[in-house]
Image (spheres, helix red, strand yellow):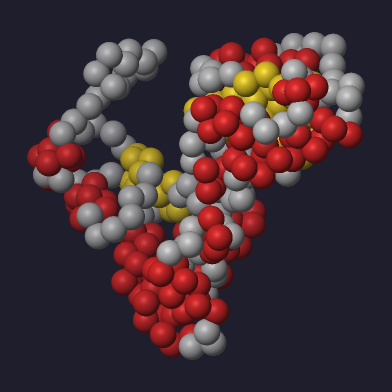
Amino acid sequence: MSDYKPAFSFTQSLLEEVYTDLFWLKNDSNVILAYPLQGALYSPLIEKMKANGKKVLLKFDSDGRIAYPLQRNYLRIPLHERLSIHNLVSDTWWRLPFKTLKRRRHAQFAAEIIRQIELSDATIIESPDALSNLNFFLAAWGRSDLIKKTYFIPNPVTPEFVYAEIGKKENIAISHGRWDDFTVKNTKVMVETVVEFLKLRHDFRFIIFGTGTKIVKSLIEKAPEDIRNRIEILGYMEHTKVVDFLRNAKIIFVPSRWESFSLASGEALCMGCSVVR
């Protein structure tokens, strides 16, 4: 954002600038923490970094299910939520036992990811299971030699959660996320679960916040009035304000169909909350 003023040195550059040798020659960084982009545009960028003497650490935001032979994440979404001719064909194709065809379809994408790892000095991924998946992917594509470059490093929880004072716990449960990311964050099931939980536990109330709360409100409308009265729906919250919500809560509910690393769960644990997945 043009008006963003961070508390650290921050430089914005045009995309065409970072694809030039001159940009990286003038850049005084010793190490680049690179966040992978899908597609064939990213490897040439890493090549520019390496050609100008930079060490490159590739930081994945992934559960390691990169491509065949591991099932891609979108297949976890029930077909009735993404019903289309394309998805019907895609799902049927994945379930057919033609390994050669699956491999051929994923070959170009797999080759690009492998090329990025080849070029980088090390590859970081955020959970042990994700590391296992990534290494399995590399072995399946005949590149076990690259496993020596892969490392598990968890995403860090920021100090305001680690050192915050925990308050007196109340019968409050919290769920927060990008609710407009309907398929990944599992918004409909989140609301259904919240309603059923509150039917069973009359002593609890629920706080839901994040982006896409219009969707949440529309789903909550069908719940009985006594349930709705114990649900507080808020909009987007700045990260630093999440501490105040977790301080007195007992539970955080994380309904996502998949996460590369659930940072929200880590923050809640530091604040003395139980995590429900």
Q: In this rendering, would 113 be left or right of 52?
A: right
Residue at 49%, 58% in the rendered image = 82
Q: Dividing the image into 4 quarters, which one contains the C terminus?
A: top right
* Above or below, 269 relative to 139: above
Q: In this rendering, would 156 be left or right of 46?
A: right
* Above or below, 8 relative to 179: above
* Above or below, 214 relative to 127: above
Relative image position of residue 24 (x, y in whole percent): 18, 40
Q: Dividing the image into 4 quarters, which one contains the N terminus?
A: top left
Q: Is residue 80 visible?
A: yes
The image quadrant that residue 54 belongs to is: top left
Q: Is residue 272 visible?
A: no
Q: In this rendering, would 167 be left or right of 31?
A: right
Relative image position of residue 71 (x, y in whole percent): 54, 68
Could you say which is closer to the camera, residue 201 or residue 59?
Answer: 201
Could you say which is closer to the camera, residue 255 or residue 205?
Answer: 205
Residue at 49%, 41% in the rendered image = 181
Relative image position of residue 244 (x, y in whole percent): 67, 13
Relative image position of residue 169 (x, y in whole percent): 84, 16
Residue at 56%, 38% in the rendered image = 155
* Above or below, 141 relative to 198: below
